[in-house]
Amino acid sequence: MTISIGAREVAERWECKRWTDFKENLKKISASNPFQQVHFPALAAYSNWNGFSEFISQSPFTTKDDLAADREKNPPYGTNLTFPLSEYKKFNQTSGTQAQPMGWLDTMEDWRWMLGNWDRVLEAAQVSPEDRCFFAFSFGPFLGFWTAYESATQRGCVCIPAGGQSTEQRLYGILNQQAEHLFCTPTYAMRLTQYAEDAGIDLSGHRLKSIIVAGETGGSLTTIRDRICSRWGKDIRVHDHYGMTEVGPVAYEKPGGQGGLRIILDSYFAEVIDPQTLQPVKDGERGELVLTTLGRVGCPVFRYRTGDLVRGVAGFDEMGLPIFDLIGGILGRSDDMVVVRGVNLYPTAVDAVVTRFPEIREYQVLIENRDSMLEAKIRIEAGENVTSLLEAALQESFSLRIPVENVANGSLPRHEMKARRWIKAE
């Protein structure tokens, strides 16, 4: 994409300020962060660098294993702390989907930085002051609950917490409090409407304008978005969002309302690499998202390998400022792929097939090792006629026969937070 000379000057000024601000943070981190001093010894020469390209050439990748090992040696919070412990006022914890939960500390300044990032998400979702926001979360130690809630509060919204409530109580809360924006995972958004249908709860009087989804993949998939919206009976928007405890709120739904994510480049430096070679991939190619936090000084991560697979495309917006979009949102995780009889299966790809069938209330994928080969089987709660239809759709999509078993309604687990539908037999 070519841009005018004026737009190019805007982009250059923006990039210069972004680097200057980040370099000031590197000064603080290099002086007093024990983890970065050991993990990233070249950081001591930060003052000689003139831009992000030099930073990238000197910085190693950071993985969750690096951070976890540091915490094991230096419990409970590790040494990735730039300031004295007394400066940290906020505690959160990773979800533990891929490993043991990991505690995370933030200073109030870093916390405000993250709230500012969430405010970008709210702006993109057209959440206005005095709007009523309903948070269908448990409000445990996961970062996203609290930053979303506090950011909406600061924006001037009426914030309605629903931690500790049943699904039925939450549905009536959405209706009775005339909520205008619902915050939850994509899985739970579908669970709410399925429960309403089963319980005979009339949703026609709702006031929802949008559902802001986060916490798992799928928020940008057309089949899931259509399924979330269809049962509310009125025009309603789904807005995808992406973030994680280790880095904070990262991206909001790209303009247009068709799914996909736009990274907040004021706050993050983004790369997409081949997870095997660790080399950059071409624009639009599938790869692993790598993030550097530009404003989280107290507990920073540089070139953090998120494990999330994306297709990143760089460009410029109408003002001439750089943008970095993730086409289709988060596509899956690099460590979630399972090879079944030579076919690569990603949970998001299977989910995209299953969600074509609204009759399926819930499902579960069983991965078993038979004769030194992995085999997959899917359990579903649905009408009998769906079994053969789903088997045919899976065969068409993956050129692989995956047996489907219909089980009793209510026998499969329901999920409020990140869905754990893939079970690997020992």
Image: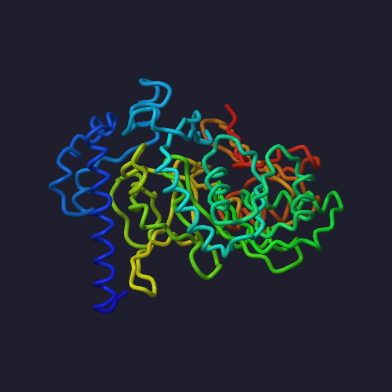
Asked whether residue 271 is in view, the answer is: no
| Up/down of 327 relative to 161, above or below | below
Q: Residue at x 67, y 41 (%)?
A: 415
* Quarter of the image where the C terminus is located: top right
| Up/down of 61 relative to 400, above or below | above
Residue 133 position by quadrant:
bottom right
In front: 96, or 266? 266
Instruction: Left or right? Give the position of 317 relative to 129.
Output: left
| Up/down of 80 relative to 231, above or below | above
**Furthest-left residue in view?**
48
Horizontal and vertical percent position of residue 7 = 29, 75
Instruction: Left or right? Give the position of 30 relative to 399.
Output: left
| Up/down of 375 relative to 267, above or below | above
Horizontal and vertical percent position of residue 146 = 55, 43
Asked whether residue 242 is in view, the answer is: yes
Q: How is the image coloured?
A: rainbow
Instruction: Left or right? Give the position of 237 relative to 317.
Output: right
Q: Residue at x 38, y 52 (%)?
A: 287
- Tally the marks: 0
* Quarter of the image where the N terminus is located: bottom left
Horizontal and vertical percent position of residue 175 = 78, 55
In front: 399, or 257? 257
In front: 286, or 215? 215
Instruction: Left or right? Give the position of 235 relative to 260.
Output: right
**Furthest-right residue in view?**
200
Horizontal and vertical percent position of residue 250 = 44, 52
Residue 137 position by quadrant:
top right
